[in-house]
Structure formats: structure tokens, C-alpha cells
Amino acid sequence: MAMFAGIALTSCNKGGMDSQNPFMSEYKTPYGVPPFDKITNADYLPAFKAGIKQQQEEIAAIVKNPEAPTFENTILAMENSGEILDKVSNVFFNITESNSTDEIQAIADSVAPLLSKNSDDIYLNADLYKRVKAIYDNKDNLNLTEEQKMLVDKINRNFVRGGANLAADKQERFRQVNAELSLQELQFGKNLLKENADYKLVIDNKDDLVGLPESVIMSAAEQAKADSMPGKWVFTLDKPSMIPFLQYSEKRDLREKIYMAYATRCNHPNEYNNNPVITKILSLSLEKARLLGFPSAADYILDNTMAKKPENVYNLLNKIWTPALKKAKEEAADMQKIIDKEGGKFKLASWDWWYYSEKVRKAKYDLNEEMLRPYFELDNVKKGIFYTAKRLYGLQFVAKPDLPKYDPEAEAYEVQDSTGKLLAILYFDYFPRASKKGGAWCTNFRPEKIVNGKRVAPIVSIVTNFTRPAGNQPALLNFDEVSTLFHEFGHAMHAMLSQVTYASLSGTNVPRDFVELPSQFDENWASEPEVLNVYAKNYKTGEVIPTELVEKLKKSGTFNQGFATVEYLAASYLDMDFYTDTALANLDVQKFEKASMDKIGLIPEILPRYRSTYFQHIFGGGYSAGYYSYIWADVLVADAFQAFKETGDIFNQKEANLFRHCILEKGGTEDAMTMYKNFRGKEPSIEPLLKARGLE
Ligand SMILES: [Zn+2]
């Protein structure tokens, strides 16, 4: 690690303190997008250092101000501080996720403690806090707007949660804990990226491809070529490669091999073992919470969410667990029947689930994913997403192929409202790379805000790991990937439609268990026949998806939902159990995981969606004690979609306008439940969710 840091430092000359560093001056690009073509790795560290220095000076000026604290001279001045730091962070932390290299990771290592210290220097600054608190205590008498009050609340809360009320000796320890925690979380992610990329299932015997569809074989052959093994077939642990293998390979031993490689990532006795990293992360998190007077890490984390307390999370999980487990057991029994009928003479195992569930789907609904793929060409799916956004909110999309990009495969759009006014810039980056983290996410390179009455358009980015084009065949998605694109686009709309004054409150800056509402909400349109008819067209013939296929898709909507819900909930329990645990002294991560899963009665045929050593969400992704957020939001989502269903029109303009104005435009400027009730006229109920998943 130190060696790479050395390289990063010695190559700094060019980007040094001179004006050539792109982060240090205004971006002279269309729309002010980051000048990706001009940014080099050598620019990051100097910009971080300069950005921190700038912010420290601005903070010092706030503290030294002889005037009494006001919203403008303290809260707003803080909100506007650190411009260079924001600029470099907005680029760098996206690149670490989507285009990482050893050099980038080394820079991240050097930067993490600097940022952690900078943040502590601000939130542990007693004189600064005194000014903030004076405003907070008096906020109702200052003639502030509701949004300004929310900003005061948020900044004050950041101080309290950042240790401002701690005694000096405890503050010192608090700083150490924060610094160490940020490094351990980075380590977790690095180990995972490494082990994930290192594994390859190499097939050199054609017979071992039995059962696989032609398109899957073709992709594996291309992967082999890319890995300098022409003539062979390579499968990786990236989902677009592994999942089709699990679904279709008739070689049970090979299914086991790749699945176990996936399920044991970072759980081997080597340098990438994440068990000791987890132990450290958990004990540091607990120590931090205790310093602030909370009984557990989960209590501290949840204090800042809609759920508020661990018991509220467990209550929700418990309500759904029992019906979901029952359904999953029925699904397993259906599959065992097929195994027995085929004379299998073995018990269904976790690596069999995808293979036999495909058989059940075929038998029950006469449907498999390969029948759908030709209708889900990536470009067509994108058209469906744009169509939906246009019908609901009047959005228009103009391709901008000439904008600077951080990877040649990325693409850019200008997003306009119905009158042609600029709303946002939107990037897409679709396919897996060794330098990219797994999964899918939406992020931004610049948040929305309003400065002197003028709205700054956000620059938003959607990053996914979808099935690549193979040979002369375009990228053909499975339905899961289609839903994912709608999902991430829902986050993007939350960011793009934002009409908020302060960046800290704009777009997706909402409680973590509220942020998945716009995204999961948007998924609903993917499978609506009215929308499918527009976008699901055969990539060869242009023929619209046949009605009977749409019917089958609709009928199979609750198919395998027992499994999907159980593996998700199991991971949510595991997360909550880790972060509510207070007896961590002799923690054995693997034993803890097993005990946690035994307690809820998880069946051996299903593993939690993430096992501990690759649970990036909770050990480095900002979702610690927060993986439950998806189902929490899903209660709101199912209830919200019900509002459209009740009108009989999935494009009902009154509901769409309400959703836009009460939620999508509001960012975090109001209390989350208040926003929801403004839209729906009532609190959400859980019934629509149970119904949607077939768990009634
Ligand atoms: Zn999401």
C-alpha cells in the first residue's frame, strides 16, 4: 500500500499547485460537467489538500466573525464552504467505484484520513458549534423558511452526531475511531474487489457447456478472449456471467463450484480475508455509538432515519418473514419434486436454486428468461424508460455524444422539462469492468441547488453491470436487469427533478430508508403491458412483445418471490443483528452469522443475499444497520403505486403531479412521512406490499 502511495505522490508534479489542476478553476465545459478528458490521477491529491485548506480557512473566518451568529453568516456560510473539496470529491468517489485502479485505491487510502480529520475539525470545533447552537436554539424566532429550518436542524444534528458535545478527552478518541473506521471500510471494499475479480471458472471442454443458451456461451467465449484464453470459455462472479450459468448449466458440480466461489469471497485464510476487518468495523462502530450515549451502533445509526429505533425495524422484518419463509419452503418443495421426478436422488442445495426455479417457471408459466431477452435490447429498454418519464412528468432526452466522459463506454444526455428547459445532465455506464464495483447505483457529479435565484442543473450518473453485447448481438437484458434500470432511473429522477435551494437538502439527500421510494416506485412501470408494448420489441424483427408473453410475465410476477424476499430479509436480519450486538469482545464472525440465520430458521437451500464477508452495503457502502431500508421503502412504494391503480390509469396526471411536487422535487426539505402523507393523504399500509409479493 505504501508503495502505491509513493507512486501517487511522486507523480504529483504536473497537477501540483499550479493552475492546471482542473479542480482548482471553473470547469470550462458544456453545462459545467467535469472535464474528464483533462483530469489525471495526479490531480486528485493536490486538489483534496487545497480543498481542505480552503474549507478550513472558510470555517476559521466564520468562527472569527465578530458579528452575532445569523443564518447567513454561520449556517449558509458553512453550507457554501469547501467548493474545491466538493468538486474533487464528486469526481473522485465516483471514479473509485466505477473506474478504479491500484493507483486510485492508493490515493483513496491517503485521502480517507485527511477527510476524516477535516470533518472532525469542523464538527468538533467548539466555537463553531456555539454559533450553530445559538441559531438552532432560536430558530423559530428568526423568520426562517421551512427549508432553512431544515438546514439548521441538519447541520446542528451533524454536530451532535459528530461528537460536538463530548468532553475533550473523549473527542480525541472519537477522532481516532472515525479515522480507523474509514480505513477499515475501504479495506473491506478493496479485498472484495480483488477476490471478485481474481476468480474465473475456466471451461476448456465443450461438453461442460451443456444446457447453456448460445448467447451465454458466446459471452463466455468473449470473456475468455479478453482474458487471453482464446478457444476456452470463462465465467466470472459478476452477475451477468454467473447467474445465467446457475440458471442453465446442467453440470451440477460446476454450478456448485462457481456458486461456492461466490459465497466464500473474502472468507479464506489469505490477505483478503474480511472476517478480521468486520470485527474491527463492528467494534469501532459500537465504540462510536457508546461515546455518543447510544446503547448500540444500530441505535445511533437509526436515530437519523424514518425507522428511528431497532425494534421498529425488527417489527417490520418479522411481519414479512413468516409468510415469506412459508412461500420459500413451498418453492423449494416444488423444485424437489422435479429433482425426484428426474431421478435426481439428491436434496436441493443453494447452488441448485436458479437452475430448478427456471424449470419450475417453464413448467408453471411456460416462460424462461431467454424467451424474453430478445425483447429487452438495452436501447429499447432505455426508450421505455424515457417514454415513461415523458408520460408521467413530461421529460425529454437529447443525446450528447460529445460531452466529456470518464470512460469511452459511458453516454450522456441532456434532460429537459416539457417546455425544453434544461433540468439535468444524465450519464449512463452500463457494462461490467474489472475496475468497476458489482451491482448498480445512481450517483451525481454535481447536486442540484439554487444560487441567487438561478437553478444549478444536477449532473447525474447511472452505473450498472449489465449483460454485454456479444458477437454481433446487441446487449440483451433479462427482466431483472430491466427492473434495475428502471430502479436506478427512479433515483435519477429524484436527483434531476429536485427544486431545492441548498445542496445538502437536494435530490436524494433524504433519510436512508426513504431514498429507495422513488427508485422502487419507478420499477412498477417496467412490467405494465401499456409500457411493454412501447419498448419491448424484438431486436431482430421489431415485432412488439406478443400478448401471451406479456400475460405470462404478468402471471409469473409473484414467481420465486418467496426466495427473493427470504434471501433479502435474511441479509437484513444479519445486518441488524451485527449492529445491535453489544458483546463483541470475542466475536467469531462466521459463528455469529450462523447463529443469526439459525435464529430466524433460514432453510439451508437459501443463503442470505449477502454473507458477512461480502456484505459491502453494511461494511463499506453506507448501509450499516440500513439494509432493511429497501423493504421499508417498499411498503411506501406498494402503497404509492396503489394510488395510481385506484384511478385505473398508470399515467394519471393528477397523481403524477402530486408525486412530483410532494416528493421528487422536495429532496430532504421536509420530514419524510409528512412528504408521503402530502402525496397520499394518509400513512401507508402494509397490505399492498404483501399482495404484490404474493405473500398474503
Ligand atoms: Zn436503489
Image: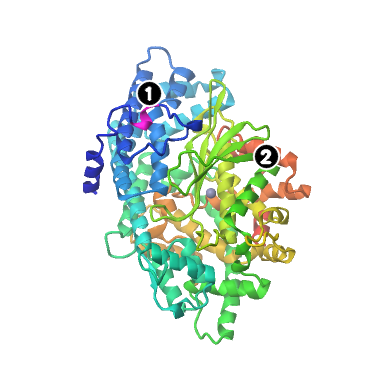
Residue 686 makes an appearance in the image: no
Would you identify the image quadrant in which residue 538 lies?
A: bottom right
Position in image of residue 576 (x %, y %): 46, 54
Instruction: Please rate how many residues cluster around mark 2, counting C-alpha atoms within 10 Å: few if below 14, some from 14 to 19, many from 20.
Output: some
Residue plotted at (55% across, 48% down): 488
The answer to which of 42 and 113 lies nearer the viewer is: 42
Give the side of residue 244 with respect to residue 584, left or right.
right
Total tally of numbered discs in the picture:
2
Position in image of residue 218 (x %, y %): 49, 68
Residue plotted at (67% across, 42% down): 390
Chain part drawn in magenta: 21-25
Quarter in which the C terminus is drawn: bottom right
Q: Which residue is mark 2?
A: 393
Would you identify the image quadrant in which residue 483 lies?
A: bottom right
Give the side of residue 491 with respect to residue 384, left or right.
left
Check the image and report above or below for 44 versus 370. above
Q: Residue furthest front?
A: 472
SS at mark 1 in the image? helix
Q: Which residue is mark 1?
A: 128
Q: Amino acid at mark 2?
A: Tyr
Residue plotted at (50% across, 66% down): 243
The answer to which of 636 and 81 lies nearer the viewer is: 81
Q: Residue furthest right?
A: 648
SS at mark 2 in the image? helix
Position in image of residue 281 (x %, y %): 34, 50
Q: Is residue 221 one of those drawn in magenta? A: no
